[in-house]
Amino acid sequence: MAVSGLPPYDDANIFARILQGEIPAKKVYEDAWAFAFHDINPQAPVHVLVIPKGKYVSFADFTASASAEEIAGFMRAVGKVAKDLGLEASGYRLLLNMGEHSGQEVPHLHVHLFGGRPLGRMLSSGS
C-alpha cells in the first residue's frame, strides 16, 4: 500500500542495490528484517545506517504498510546494533530523514545511528 503523496519505491536506489548484493557495503549486522552498514561519508566516529529489508520509501510508508512483525524486527535490530557497537553507556543519536527539507538523499527508509563523541545540539538555531 503506497502512502499518499510519497514517490513510488525505486528498485534501483543505492540501498536496494546494496540489499541485492550489487554494491558492496561494510556490514555491521544483518537479520531477517534489517541490514546495517557503515556510512561511506561518516559524520561521527560511529555512523551506521540501518535499513529495513522491505521496500519502504519513508517512515510513514513503513508504519502504514509493513507488518507488525517487520516493524518490531526492524526496531529491535536498530537497538541491537547500538548495543553491539557499545554505544549505550556513552549515548548515541538516531536520525531518520524524510523528504527534501530533511535532506533525505536515498528514497529507502533508513536510520542513521551516530555515536563515539559528544554530538552537540540536535538542530542549529539558524532559520
Image (cartoon, grey):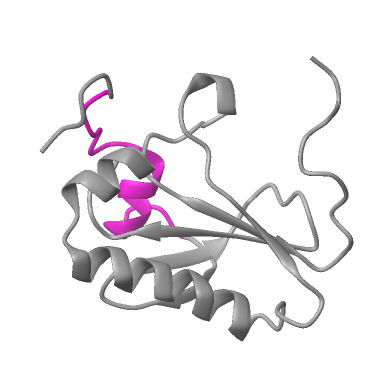
Identify the residue at horizontal 52%, vertical 75% (top origin): 79
Residue in the picture at 72% in, 77% down: 87
The residue located at (26%, 19%) in the rendering is: 5
Residue 58: give x, y in percent of width and height. Answer: 36, 39
Q: Residue 4 versus residue 111: which sits nearer the camera?
A: 4
Instruction: Tell whether 120 sits left or right of 71.
Output: right
- The quarter holding residue 75 reads bottom left
**Is residue 60 positioned above or below 125 on the image?**
below
Image coords of residue 106 (percent x, y): 44, 35
Q: Nearer the viewer, residue 24 or 88?
A: 88
Residue 21 lies left or right of residue 100; in this view the side is left
| Residue plotted at (51% across, 80% down) | 80
Quadrant containing the C terminus is top right
How many callouts does the rendering have?
Answer: 0
Image coordinates for residue 90, horizontal then vertical, percent: 82, 76
Query: Residue 22: within the magenta?
Result: yes
Decide whether residue 69 is among the magenta residues.
Answer: no
Q: Residue furthest top?
A: 127
**Quarter of the image with the N terminus in it:** top left
Residue 18 relative to residue 119: left or right: left
Quick check: 69 above or below 86? above
Q: Is residue 30 above or below residue 101?
A: below
Q: Magenta segment, principal secondary structure?
A: loop
Which stretch is magenta?
A: 7-24
Residue 26, percent from left and from top: 54, 67
